[in-house]
Amino acid sequence: MHGCSRSWCELKIVYTPKCLRFGRIGHPESPRRVEKAADFLKNKGYEFTDPGKCTEEDLLTVHSRDFIEKVKNNNFHISDCPRYDKIYEYACLSVGGALKAAEINGFSLMRPPGHHATHDSVGGFCYFNNIAVAVERSDKKVLIVDIDRHHGNGTQNIFFGRDDVEYVSLHSVGYPGTGKLSKQNCRNHRFTRTVEDDEYLEVLGSMLNSSGEFDLLAVSAGFDTHKEDPLASQIQLTTESYRRVGKKLSELGLPTFCVLEGGYGADHLGKNIHSFISGLED
Ligand SMILES: [Zn+2]
């Protein structure tokens, strides 16, 4: 964590325990996963800071007014996105985490996640698209790299066809079923069979090498690619591999911020994030 001259070294964690105040027993996206990760990272000596404010104007850069009203009024019906009391406030707080992470080149350790939320729909445990709002508010040319095991259909939906944002995703078959092919500024690699550390790192490297020129790197940091994750898939990564993933991303030499997406093993999430950040700071 020390002796490094780059701007994103000694990276701060953006977090408030307020994000633990909603949840449903048996739902994989539980408060416990983030709470345990926060404890682990605090014990490792990371500095923590509060999320920023998210206004309705911020949300409107990405989502429709009608959709924002629907979330406000709990007027949506998707089984994996429960209609929690005050979910609008918690979803805004999580967007505020992404905005703060973008401002300080930090890591937002907030919930709910965001990459399945489209312009006008919730989905896959996501209500608002946290990283998309932070990217829009940055006013920079941005490379988004999504390392969650699920394709970020929401992020692709929001930025599809844009020439100031490129979206790169590595994911497995399964939910949400999108991201089979690359199209325009959205470059997808879908693993259809078992993949372990070395092959995954090779594919990531080749995807990054063929990216354009950018001012900012935004990482949708999902850790459900871990081989012991409760939602594990054909992507079977070790904790150590996240250090290598972080290092590959740091080699792009761009100011970087990260936003937590998936990662459902409460015993692994903190360790995997620590490994990843260590690689970013290598
Ligand atoms: Zn995921």
Image (spheres, helix red, strand yellow):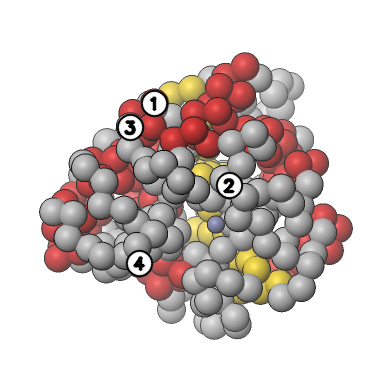
Percent from the top left, x then y, of residue 248? 74, 51
Q: Are marks 1 and 2 in contact (CB under 8 Å)?
A: no
Specify whether tag 3 is near ligand 1 (CB below 8 Å): no
Marks 1/3: CA distance?
Answer: 8 Å
- Compare marks 2 and 3 and give the one earlier in the sequence: 3
Looking at the image, which residue is at 57% across and 45% down? 264
Q: Which residue is mark 4?
A: 118
Q: Which residue is mark 2?
A: 263
Q: Answer above or below: position of 40 versus 117.
A: above
Picture quarter with ligand 1: bottom right
Kindly tell me whether residue 89 is visible in this rendering: yes
Between circles 4 and 1, the one closer to the viewer is 1
Q: Which residue is mark 1?
A: 17
Between circles 4 and 3, the one closer to the viewer is 3
Looking at the image, which residue is at 76% across and 56% down? 236
Specify whether tag 2 is near ligand 1 (CB below 8 Å): yes
Marks 2/3: CA distance?
Answer: 18 Å
**Helix, strand or loop status at disc 1:** helix
Marks 4/3: CA distance?
Answer: 24 Å
Q: Residues within 10 Å of mark 3 (few under 14, many from 20)?
A: few
Taking 161 as reference, is 5 left or right? right
Looking at the image, which residue is at 62% across and 17% down? 43
Q: Which residue is mark 3?
A: 21
Q: Are marks 1 and 3 in contact (CB under 8 Å)?
A: yes
| Circle number at residue 27 | none
- 158 or 110: which is nearer to us? 110
Marks 4/2: CA distance?
Answer: 20 Å
Q: Answer above or below: position of 39 versus 131.
A: above
